[in-house]
Image (cartoon, grey):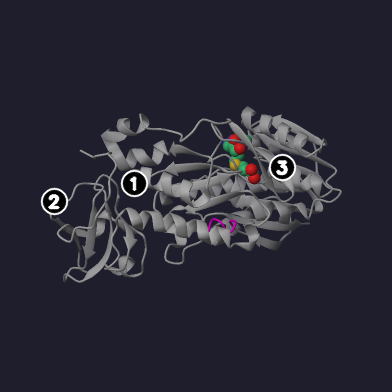
Amino acid sequence: MIEFARIVTISDQTKTLTLKSGRDKSVRAHHPRLFSGAVKSIDGGPSDGDVVDVQDNKGEWLARGVLNRLSPIVVRLLTWRRDEVVDEAFWRARVAAAIARRNVDPLLAETDARRLVFGESDGLPGVIADEYAGQIVVEFSALCALRVRDIIVSALQESTGAARVLERIDEERLRSELGNNMRLVRAQQRESASGPASVQIREGGLRFLVDLSSGQKTGFYLDQRDNRRRVAAYCRGARVLNSFSFSGAFSVYALAAGAQHVTNVDSSQDALALARTNAELNGVSEVTHVVADALEDLRHRRTAGELFDVVVLDPPKYAHTPSQLERATRAYKDLNRAALALVRPGGVLATFSCSGVVDAALFQQSIAVAALEAHRNVRIVERLSQASDHPVLLSYPESEYLKGVVARVE
Ligand code: SAH
């Protein structure tokens, strides 16, 4: 039974996980996830959620992390330093360090909306924390993080002076982490203080309304911050189609940069309601909003003979696991093919994938097939990635998930 009381996880040398022979490579390379197939034995009677020491087949100490036998990720590794104890001070220091990195980031100087903690990339598996104008939304997606949620919340508050911390649970991911204990978690969703359901943030000299209560992700796609500015540079005087627009952030940037007109397409009515507000907030009016399935909408416009100077394509995650790769690649190909057909000769396609398992090469390949099928000559002019507050940890290349391509279409 998993204990959710306030805890301080203190490393206990007697709780030890031993790896199978030859299965120590990823741990030695500081990869933060240990998969169950590598485990030879677990000794000392640890409960799930306890800190364990990880050793190789010959008994050499390698690392320390939190055990969870219910998950295929059997240990979330936290430290490779034997003298580093996983106690309350450890977690507080990790949160403080993550925030300190953002505070010195020159790319974040112009905004009050930033990702403070990006999971493994900040040495905090299962924790995502975003700050929106002094309000923090924190999302827990692993047992390892849930067990120290009080500490994480208090550390976030302490390091930022935030007025309010809203806690969210990633139910889908936690289900595979907690099994039957999921019930316990739902009862524990909280916020540290009451406050508004939405808040206005500043980004790139513009204003956006972020829905804190029911927003997607944690309310705003912070990872696209730099890309909105880069894509807007192609939009002066342009007629733009923003497919999968969410709250229309790419569109507001484009109009502020002198776009003639933008069409937002999204399947979510709520997202488009926010998009309307965001256009108003920034005094831009040349926007049309269309609630539709994006692929159907693209194909419909093709039949109607419509053309755009710039098409932005930012679909949700299509592949969550490697087994979904083939289907996802086909979906990207179909979508990009339909989008390419709408770009006027000499125009621009800005296309994205946020599926971590689809790497840049595979994404490019699916656009290449789309170009062939659409009979268009396409040249990549810019490659885009995730914003600096979503850093890529070198020992965890999977933390690089957002890929974008700006292409000139003949
Ligand atoms: N570009 C946006 C983020 C897009 S997120 C930004 O910068 O803020 C993906 C969006 O796709 C979500 O708003 C979701 O509602 C929408 N979506 C998901 N499936 C869809 C579909 N089949 N057709 C249209 N929109 C869809």
Which label sits in the foreground, 3 or 2? 3
Q: Is residue 159 above or below residue 288?
A: below
Circle 1 — which element? Answer: loop
Kindly tell me whether residue 273 is visible in this rendering.
yes
The residue range painted magenta reads: 386-391
Q: Disc 1 designates what residue?
A: 148
Asked if the residues shown at circle 3 and circle 1 are in contact, with their CB atoms under 8 angstroms apart, the answer is no
For marks 3 and 1 on the same chain, the one whose residue lies earlier in the sequence: 1
Q: In what quadrant of the picture does the C terminus appear?
A: bottom right
Distance of mark 1 from mark 2, alpha carbons? Answer: 21 Å
Distance of mark 3 from mark 2, alpha carbons? Answer: 53 Å
- Whether the residue under disc 1 has CB within 8 Å of ligand 1: no
Q: Quadrant of ligand 1?
A: top right
- Along the viewing direction, whichever of 375 and 358 lies nearer the viewer: 358
Q: Disc 3 designates what residue?
A: 207
Distance of mark 3 from mark 1, alpha carbons? Answer: 34 Å
Give the residue type that dot 2 points to.
Answer: Gly
Q: Answer with the quarter of the image where residue 184 lies.
A: top left
Q: Main secondary structure of the magenta part?
A: loop
Q: Is residue 122 magenta?
A: no
- Along the viewing direction, whichever of 222 and 13 lies nearer the viewer: 13
> What residue is rendered at 68% in x and 46% in y?
202
Lateral position of residue 119 relative to residue 406, left or right: left
Lateral position of residue 98 relative to residue 27, left or right: right
Give the residue type that dot 1 points to.
Answer: Val
User: Residue 78 appears at what percent x and percent y?
Assistant: 34, 59
User: Residue 208 appears at what percent x and percent y?
Assistant: 68, 40
What crowding class fits label 2: few (fewer than 14 Cα within 10 Å), some (14-19), or many (20 or more)? few
Kindly tell me whether residue 359 is visible in this rendering.
no
Q: Disc 2 designates what residue?
A: 45
